[in-house]
Image (spheres, grey):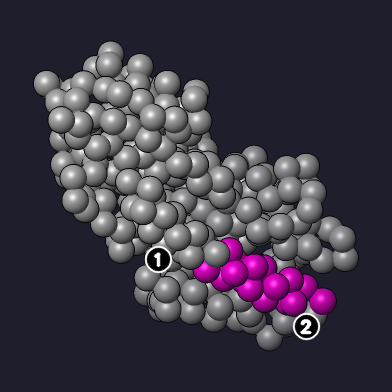
């Protein structure tokens, strides 16, 4: 069990480090655009951006042309200053596209600025997906990197996995602040698909039943044998295609602390409260020994349950 923990932990930490390095690079690239914002805006094609009757500014042909989508919610009325920011930061498009195209674990790459302006790749229909008047700095994928939550200005993780509102499945986000002249201009990020994050992990190896679980008991990845044992949905494709209304959306039936089985709920609660110490559990007539190892970067647990004769 300890060897398997070590292998899975090492693979996850490698993926975490890679994502952090890419997000830091993205932040640096975006920050470099701000000193020459007005000059950059003058050479951009202003006709690409259209203002709707509801006050939303968007990029008309983003999906058709395969370039990053743009959405300015209008919660702050769109004026010449905001248009200058939008047009002047077009220079991040190549790096957003490269991040998403060159790294299969990246579901999407994006930038959110303090005026509720979003630039994101791959593109989608932002008008139907996002609500007008959306106050982006109030969402966790922004505020967790702001001056209050991240005074050291580091690359950080949104530690709760969520269902991507653009329909790309379960994600976890790595974000970084973008500062110019000591002002937080915005927050950039990479959404990492959990499917690719765990693709190379053997969660059904040997007799161990292994799962990755958040600190609130939500299972984000496991093998089929473990899913059956702990009465989890098998290969469910969770998608959320409504407009964004809250920080996160996670199916309740993946949370073992809310399992219909009292024994499962009690065992997982004890495992978390006792910081991964060995627990014994009996499910459907089978005796199991469970142990957990904490992954601090994501606030996740690697949990292994081994049949005991």
Q: Classify 49 as above or below 138.
A: below
Q: Is 21 included in the stretch rendered in magenta?
A: yes
Q: Is residue 1 left or right of residue 21?
A: left
Q: Which residue in the structure is indicated by mark 1?
A: 105
Residue 293 screen position, x and y as percent = 45, 42
Furthest residue in direction bottom, as rendered: 43
Can I make out residue 282 in this image? yes
Q: Is residue 267 left or right of residue 286?
A: right
Q: Which residue in the structure is indicated by mark 2?
A: 39
Can I make out residue 118 in this image? no
What residue appears at the point 67 percent right and 76 percent down from the top-left corner? 29
What residue appears at the point 19 percent right and 25 percent down from the top-left corner? 287
What residue appears at the point 71 percent right and 57 percent down from the top-left corner? 154
Tell me the quarter of the picture where residue 84 sits.
bottom right
What secondary structure is the stretch in magenta mostly built from?
helix
Tell me the quarter of the picture where residue 307 sits.
top left
Q: Nearer the viewer, residue 23 or 5?
A: 5
Name the mark nearer the viewer: 1 or 2. 1
Q: Of label 1 and label 2, which has the lower sequence position? A: 2
Label 2 SS: helix
What span is in magenta?
18-35
Q: Nearer the viewer, residue 236 or 41?
A: 236
What residue appears at the point 36 percent right and 53 percent down from the top-left corner? 3
């Amino acid at each position: 069990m300890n060897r398997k923990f070590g292998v899975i932990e090492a693979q996850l930490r490698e993926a975490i480090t890679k994502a952090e390095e890419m997000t830091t690079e993205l932040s640096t690239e975006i920050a470099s655009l701000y000193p020459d914002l007005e000059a950059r805006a003058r050479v951009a094609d202003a006709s690409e951006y259209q203002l709707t009757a509801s006050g939303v500014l968007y990029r008309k042909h983003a999906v058709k042309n395969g370039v990053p989508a743009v959405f300015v919610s209008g919660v702050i009325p769109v004026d010449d200053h905001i248009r200058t920011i939008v047009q002047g930061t077009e220079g991040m498009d190549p790096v957003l596209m490269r991040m998403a195209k060159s790294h299969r674990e990246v579901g999407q790459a994006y930038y959110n600025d303090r005026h509720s302006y979003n630039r994101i790749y791959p593109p989608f229909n932002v008008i139907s997906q996002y609500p007008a008047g959306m106050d982006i700095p109030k969402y966790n994928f922004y505020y967790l990197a702001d001056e209050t939550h991240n005074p050291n200005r580091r690359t950080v993780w949104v530690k709760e996995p969520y269902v991507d509102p653009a329909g790309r499945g379960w994600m976890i986000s790595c974000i970084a602040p973008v500062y110019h002249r000591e002002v937080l201009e915005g927050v950039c990020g990479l959404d990492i698909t959990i499917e690719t994050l765990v693709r190379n992990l053997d969660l059904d190896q040997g007799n161990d039943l292994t799962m990755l679980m958040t600190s609130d008991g939500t299972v984000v990845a496991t093998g089929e044998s473990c899913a059956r044992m702990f009465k989890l949905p098998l290969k469910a494709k969770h998608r959320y295609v409504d407009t964004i209304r809250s920080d996160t959306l996670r199916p309740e039936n993946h949370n073992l602390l809310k399992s219909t089985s009292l024994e499962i709920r009690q065992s997982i609660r004890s495992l978390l409260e006792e910081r991964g110490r060995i627990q014994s559990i009996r499910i459907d007539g089978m005796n199991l020994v469970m142990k957990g190892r904490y992954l601090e970067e994501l606030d996740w647990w690697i949990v292994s349950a081994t049949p005991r004769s």
